[in-house]
Image (cartoon, rainbow, N blue to C red):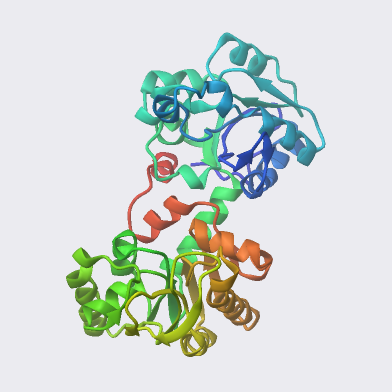
Amino acid sequence: MASFSSHNFSGHKALIRVDFNVPIKNGVITDDTRIRAALPTIKKVLADGGSVVLMSHWGRPLKDIEKKPNLTLADFTLKPVAAHLATLLGTDVQFADDCISDDAAQKAAALQPGQVLLLENLRYYKQEEKGDVDFAAKLAKLGDVYVNDAFGTAHRAHASTAIIAQFFPGDKKMFGLCMEGEVTAAENVLHNNKKPFTAIIGGAKVSDKILIIENLLEKATDIIIGGGMAYTFFKAEGGHIGSSLCEDDRLDMALDLIRKADEKGVTIHLPADSIIADKFAADAATSSSLSSEVPAGWMGLDIGNMAIAHFKQVISQSKTILWNGPMGVFEMDKFQHGTKAIAEAVVEATKHGAYSLVGGGDSVAAVNKFGFADKVSYVSTGGGAMLEYFEGKELPGIAAINK
């Protein structure tokens, strides 16, 4: 594997796998975080005197068209991304109407130093997700150096992320700056952490986070659990949770996690109290209660003041912090206070020297919403990939470069 930072791209055509799977509404990009994350990599190649061929997926076109016949491939085009990227780069971005067509090959071959080409959506072809070798080989011909800068897809063994690397020698395949940053941040937390190490795990379901919690029992000193998943733990311990979210088939699992944590000397912190509502709606009537004494007909939708105070104290003493998942339904103003308070506590701990990594779609959305993205140590662009990394799995997109 070559080092991206020390590689000179002068006269080279860099084929870069980016993650431009961004939200687009009525042809307008509503969040360009992932596009901006790739800019340093693109700019480095151009500054060296190289040219750039970009490839990405967007959505699930073939699967969605099968479900909704009124949709066509044109509904999943990357053309709006090309236009937006041109604005961000301040230079023209050419667009190929396919990723492996003659048009794509001709435009890639004609690229001059300093020029950029974006290929059409890789997932127009089922071979991409199937990890097809022939499809990967066709893509590989479009560049002479392969750069994987798409951490968000590193957990998928797709043609453009894992299979394609075999067509490039070791000195012509590498991680981009975004990918390097993601891997370094994850390594800092998993293997180079300073204690106390607090993992803040939120979200709806224990089943979604079981593997990450089990892996963190080997690493963390403290695990804070919030969000809907907390009520499964309270019910498992005999509490009353009203109509709060609960996975009844995971009660034994919750008790087992508590037992394992106790055996390993890891402290699990559950929210002592909750903000409760009479329905799951923005206009719901609200009250507060102990999390283990939620009245019938009411549901917990945020952590309460006692929980916030306790969690903030734990976070303030931490030297390493991983945050994955919100503390409540932060999308509704009435139930965002807990998540915002935890974000503020993470920011404050970071100011005092803690290393903080925010990973996972909802927690990333939360720090962006509250304007704290630049006040923590690192915000991951890869939701599922970061989760699997912290579950201890080998990511195919990383393994392919390291071979």
Quadrant in which residue 42 is drawn: top right
Residue 364 on image: x %, y % = 56, 60
Horizontally, residue 244 falls left or right of residue 72, namely: left
Q: Residue at x 53, y 77 (%)?
A: 338
Quarter of the figure with the C terminus: top left
Which residue corresponds to the image point at 57% horizontal and 18% vertical from the top-left?
Answer: 98
Does residue 357 appear in this view? Answer: yes
Residue 103, image x, y percentages: 62, 11
Please tell me which residue is depicted at 63% across the width and 81% down the height of the picture: 348
Residue 258 vs 117, above or below: the answer is below
Q: Quadrant of residue 390?
A: bottom left
Residue at the (39%, 18%) spot, across then down: 134
Of 203 and 7, nearer the camera is 203
The relative height of residue 58 versus residue 124 in the rendered view (above or below) is: below
Residue 4 appears left or right of 270: right
Q: Taking the image as drawn, is residue 143 in sight?
A: no
Against 20, residue 324 (above or below) is below
Residue 302: percent from left, percent from top: 47, 75
Q: Is residue 238 left or right of residue 326?
A: left
In the image, farthest residue toward the top: 102
Quick one: 307 or 149, which is closer to the camera?
A: 307
Residue that lies at the very extreme toward the left in this rendered image: 252
Q: Residue furthest right?
A: 90
